[in-house]
Amino acid sequence: MVARVTHYHIRPGKVEEFVATVQSLIPVMDKLRGFRVLIVLRGEDPASRDAMAISVWDTAADLKNSDNDAFYYHVLARLMGCCESFSPTQEQEVLVSKFPSQ
């Protein structure tokens, strides 16, 4: 398994919109081959505007193929509108995981 990790710095007043946009992306991701789970994290400070998204995929090919989904890119563009900046995505190997069976 592989993970895509991206860090976001959300615009002031846009955290709720950011969360809603991510939630609208989940049904699309559920239909993509090899998608396992999406986790979006924010720091301990409830006022923090920094978030990290981790999506886990069965294979690197599945992760790369997700980049070709047009709706995925449409929602991603909306997500970027909520952010001041974001880091380049990183692909990382998953060494250990425990997810419920699908």
Image (cartoon, rainbow, N blue to C red):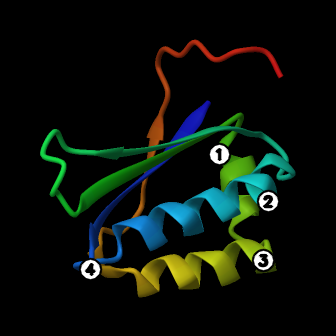
Mark 1 and mark 4 in contact (Cβ < 8 Å)? no
First in sequence: mark 1 or mark 2?
A: 2
Helix or strand or loop: what does disc 1 sit on? helix
Task: Tell me the SS state at disc 4.
Answer: loop
Say which label, 2 or 3, has the lower sequence index: 2
4 vs 2, front mark: 4
**Badge nearest the viewer, 3 or 4:** 4
Instruction: Look at the numbered discs 2 and 3 and tell me whether their residues touch, using CB distance below 8 Å.
Output: yes
Q: Earlier in the sequence, mark 4 or mark 1?
A: 4
Q: Nearer the viewer, mark 1 or mark 3?
A: 3
Mark seen at residue 71:
3
In three-dimensional space, the C-alpha distance between marks 1 and 2, rounded to whole angstroms, equals 18 Å
Indicate the quadrant where residue 20 lies: bottom right
Question: Which residue position holds label 1?
Answer: 60
Nearer to us of marks 1 and 2 is 2
Residue type indicated by callout 1:
Ala
Q: Nearer the viewer, residue 20 or 78?
A: 20
Instruction: Give the labeled residue for mark 2.
Output: 28
- Real-space Cα separation, disc 2 to disc 3, in angstroms: 8 Å
Q: How far apart are the alpha carbons under marks 3 and 4?
A: 23 Å
Tell me the quarter of the image containing the C terminus. top right
